[in-house]
Image (tube, helix red, strand yellow):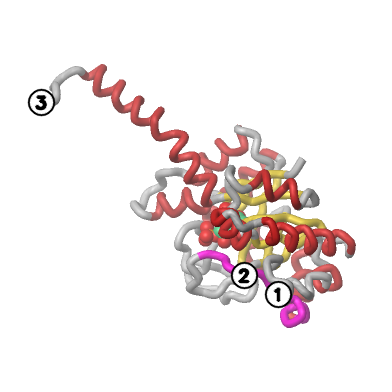
Amino acid sequence: MTFLSVNVNKIAVLRNSRGGNDPDVVQAARACLHAGAHGITVHPRPDARHIRAADVHALAALTAARGVEFNLEGNPFAPPRPGYPGFLALCAAVRPAQATLVPDGDAQLTSDHGFDFARDAERLSPLVEQLRGLGCRVSLFADAWDPVRSAGVEHAAAIGADRIELYTGPYADAFHRGEHASMLERFADVARRARSVGLGVNAGHDLSQENLGAFLAAVPEVLEVSIGHALIGEALHDGLQATVRGYLAILDGAGVASAP
Ligand SMILES: CC(=O)[C@@H](O)[C@H](O)COP(=O)(O)O
Ligand SMILES: NCC(=O)COP(=O)(O)O
């Protein structure tokens, strides 16, 4: 079975919009694990727009106590700044089971590309070694949608990475348009090539209940999916009716005023 690691970044987006600690990121992660999720993912960004260093520590403690995987994602080349100690420093502090390296630009809205392995392998190599020395499994974010960008995926194995994570955003877009058949062939090909050089294969970005089944049917090698944005949105939709009913029950019980 493919593992599900729930990305709780979006809980922190909501929390940060008001200050305070509601909704509580750790409580949300606990609920995901209680429901059977295999692990928790976060992707702290240098601007601390959602997950903060303190969340990383708290979630590391939760996942360690539960004996489940903590997957920490980030750009290893982004310099530290106040409130963000840097990806390597965070990994050294909490030793996540899996460190997923993502080549984000600083002001990016969200992750939108994988590494260019032919170009990036040399500077990634010592970081992969360092992270493996900390006991982390190392996964590298990789493109599969474009034959040129996915050409050097075998380099990931050569520099000692354990896995790649297929960037599935372009697949999700194509699925939405009903044009995903040829896209899936490309993902399947990259996954097969990765497996043939000993790499494990993860996948993530914009996966959802709508598009996940078709993806896994075409790319059965996937060991783990990390899903956040769609999952949290779906959870809101699924939970809204029950929550509104909860409020109505309180109002009904209070029974003071009646609306005109
Ligand atoms: C690497 C990846 O695809 C996810 O981590 C995604 O980038 C989530 O990050 P945001 O929640 O900041 O969009
Ligand atoms: N690695 C992908 C991830 O953690 C979640 O991405 P998304 O579902 O928020 O797009």
Q: Are marks 2 and 1 in contact (CB under 8 Å)?
A: yes
Q: How far apart are labels 3 and 2 at the CA level?
A: 55 Å
Q: Is residue 149 above or below residue 22?
A: below
Residue 149's disc is 1
Q: Quadrant of residue 260?
A: top left
Mark 2 or mark 3, which is nearer the start of the sequence?
2
What distance separates the C-alpha of mark 1 from that of mark 3? 63 Å
Q: Residues within 10 Å of mark 1 (few under 14, many from 20)?
A: some
- Residue type of the residue flagged with mark 3: Pro
- Which mark is drawn over residue 26? none
Secondary structure category for the residue under label 2 = loop
Query: Residue visible at 52% across and 48% down?
Result: 230
Label 2 sits on what residue type?
Answer: His
Residue 76 falls inside the magenta stretch? no
Q: Residues within 10 Å of mark 3 (few under 14, many from 20)?
A: few
Residue matched to label 2: 113
| Figure quadrant of residue 64 | top right
Tag 3 residue: 260
Under circle 3, the secondary element is loop
Q: Give whichever of discs 1 and 3 has the lower sequence position.
A: 1
Q: Amino acid at mark 1?
A: Arg
Q: Which x, y percent locates residue 28?
A: 52, 41
Q: Where residue 6 sits in the image (x, y, percent)?
A: 60, 46
Mark sitting earlier along the chain (2/1): 2
Q: What's the residue at 31%, 21% (across, down)?
A: 249
